Amino acid sequence: MKNFASAIAQIAEEKGISSDKVLETIEQALAAAYKKDYGKKGQVIRAKLDEKSGQVQFWQIKIVVDEKMIYSEEELEKLIEKQELSPARDTDGNGKIRFNAQKHIMIAEAKKINPKIKLEEEVIVPLEKKEDYGRIAAQTAKQVIMQRIREAEKESIFDEYKSKEGGIISGLVQRIEGRNVFFDIGKTLGILPKEEQIPGEFYRSGQRLKLYVLKVETTSKGPKIFLSRAYPKLVSKLFELEVPEISAGTVVIKSIAREPGSRTKIAVISLEEGIDPIGAVVGQRGTRVQVVINELGGEKIDIIEYSDDPKDFIANSLSPAKIEEIKIMPKNTALAVVPHDQLSLAIGKDGQNVRLAAKLTGWKIDIRSSLQEEKEEIEETKTTKKKKKKKKKTKTTKKEKGEVGGK
């Protein structure tokens, strides 16, 4: 039994499942072997193995029912004729069952065994112990053990990676199939689809990278783990690893906007006085932010300070451009006025800077240079003056006409 216990512990360690689960699997296999050699069709048999003595006890399980819960012979014949219930099934799924003496026991009989028993509870009937099993029973037990352990292993892997969903893990590139990259992430493989890859990033076998666990799904072949290198939260999770103030919660990433492989903007705020959020994230001589940049293959990262004041937040989001004025307009729109020499910097290459700023803040942002704004103001002033002059002239003409008519 010492060797047996050691074997259970070894299987549990290798497969990443609990010893109790392995023992439960062996008990199910023993019950299957017993039923194969000594049981009857329809029986539900349960086994219990004593780890200290090695003795096995067997029971037959029956469910307590009454007349209302079972079909009469006439009802059964009608259901089978209508093909609503097949001869092989015990229920049509609507609540009632076909009585099976091997699976069910009437409430009156059950109360003779246990006076306190209730409907739908289990009655446990002890079975005779058996020591000898045939080759087929042994083969059945072996198949049950292998199948159950595979299932338990899949469940264990699913539970482990489901708990890591929304976090980051380290993985080695194992193989590339078409557009998908498969990573060895420990107990299983994770898949990095094309749409979750950083544009322009190349992968080679054996390369180690950090990945965001996007979602975990269970399939007939086992758990499927979807990974991402393009998801914006990958950046915030990388900063959590590098910046103690973020992991401690004294510095918070309020929002993030990302164009994978090109540029990312993150807005940070400090919850404690005396802590510079930007300085904490950047690190001494830029060491902390540089680690994240290297992990992302040189992707540019702008770190800006978050503000509850929309004007300040929008102005900060357009960094590194210098902003003269922010005007809040209707329909969640803002107008940013910048010096003429800062216009292209504020807009960014192909409009990237203003586009990321809009994603980061949640505001639609228009950019104008101060020269353009001045010209428009001058034109507006001229137009206003012309309108006033025209109105004055119209009034004078009307007055003159009135005087002529009077004469």
Image: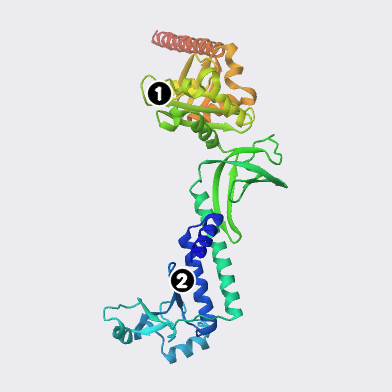
Residue sticking out furthest to the left: 115
**Residue 274 point in image, percent of width and height:** 38, 19
Q: Which residue is mark 1?
A: 309
**Residue 143 point in image, percent of width and height:** 59, 71
Quadrant the C terminus occupies = top left
- The amino acid at mark 2 is Gly
Task: Give the camera-side residue of 116 and 309.
Answer: 116
Residue sticking out furthest to the front: 2
Disc on res. 220 = none
User: Number of callouts in the render?
Assistant: 2
SS under mark 1: loop
Disc 2 or 1, which lies upstream in sequence? 2
Q: Give above or below for 112 relative to 293.
A: below
Q: Give above or below for 216 relative to 114.
A: above
Q: Nearer the viewer, mark 2 or mark 1?
A: 2
Residue sticking out furthest to the bottom: 74
Task: Find residue 168 and report its image quarter.
Answer: top right
**Residue 203 point in image, percent of width and height:** 70, 38
- Disc 2 from disc 1: Cα separation: 72 Å
- The amino acid at mark 1 is Asp
SS under mark 2: loop
Q: Give above or below for 393 relative to 313.
A: above
Tell whether label 1 touches label 2 (CB within 8 Å).
Answer: no
Crowd rating for badge 2 (residues with CA inside 10 Å; few <14, some 14–19, many 20+)? few
* Residue 356 visible here: yes
Disc on res. 54 = 2
Residue found at x 51% / y 46%: 165
